Image (tube, grey):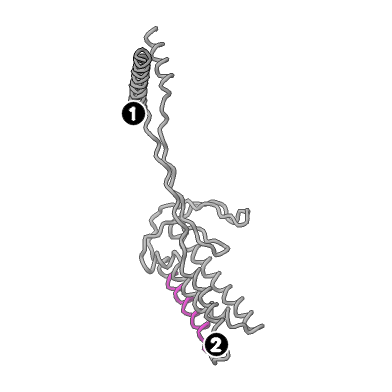
Amino acid sequence: SSCLSASIRAWLHLFDSGWAALGVLLQGAVMSCDSNCEHDEGEHPKAPEPAMPGMPSMKLSQILPMVVMMGLGKWDLDQMGYRRHAEVGFVTAQLVCWAVLAWLYTKIEGQPEDGVKIQVPEVKQLGQVVSPPIDQTTKEYDSVKLKEQAKQAVMGAVVLGGVYYKWEYLMPLVLQILMTPLQLYESPLFQLHILKYDIKRPFPTANPFGLPSAPEAPPAVAVPAVADPAAVKDKKKKDKNT
């Protein structure tokens, strides 16, 4: 029994010694890996992670129609006797917006010509190029955008006036009373020339479906190419041999 207990103690001692040696080896391997990783990080700088794109911006003009339709679903303005009020409000809103567009025209024509050219990218709609890329001055660019905005305002008023004259729908008329001034207020030309906000040209292209517009992604940061360590060592050896 004494021989058996001695042999058992010897085996336990050997087992403990083996685990201790294995622990030392593992600790040394981990330290070596950490030092190599730090060395590699010093030689190979990490590329900066690309910035996450911002959330799409929601404008008040994209929320207001739902609120107005919910309100008109509860209250019938025609039965309440507000049809004439809506007609007068529609005509007044259009006249005020056209007056503001004329004011914008005087602002744009009165700005000095700085000679700075703007690279206007091509405009695509449904996969087709509507306008090719072109270089314009700030005054020329603002004048073109003002003509487009005035054309949309006139066409919208004429089409909606014809629809109301034909079918006498009151909901589109009320929507246009609120949406026309609001869209003019949110336009880049109004914010640039009237509110004096810092708006960059060219202006973002409006979404034809009225969806929230996502902000432009930041430009990618160029990362310098890092040489392969093995290739650098081979090159050093070749230089020494030569």
Residue sitting at the far right: 166
Question: Residue 177 placed where, x, y %?
Answer: 51, 79
Given residues 207 and 113, the one toward you in this image is 207
Dot 2, how many residues are within 10 Å of its Cα: few (below 14), some (14-19), or many (20+)? some
**Left or right relative to 32: residue 88:** right
**Left or right relative to 84: residue 10:** left
Question: Residue 172 placed where, x, y %?
Answer: 58, 78
- For marks 1 and 2, the one nearer the N-term is 1
Whether residues under marks 1 and 2 lie with C-beta atoms below 8 angstroms apart, the answer is: no
Q: Amino acid at mark 1?
A: Glu
Question: Residue 151 placed where, x, y %?
Answer: 55, 69
Q: Name which residue lies at 56% across and 89% down.
A: 83
Q: Badge 2 is on which residue?
A: 77
Q: Name which residue lies at 57% across and 91% down.
A: 79
Q: Which residues are magenta?
A: 85-104
| Callout 2: SS | loop
Q: Tell whether position 76 is magenta.
A: no
43, above or below 178, in the image: above
Quadrant location, the C terminus: top left
Q: Badge 1 is on which residue?
A: 38
| Callout 1: SS | helix
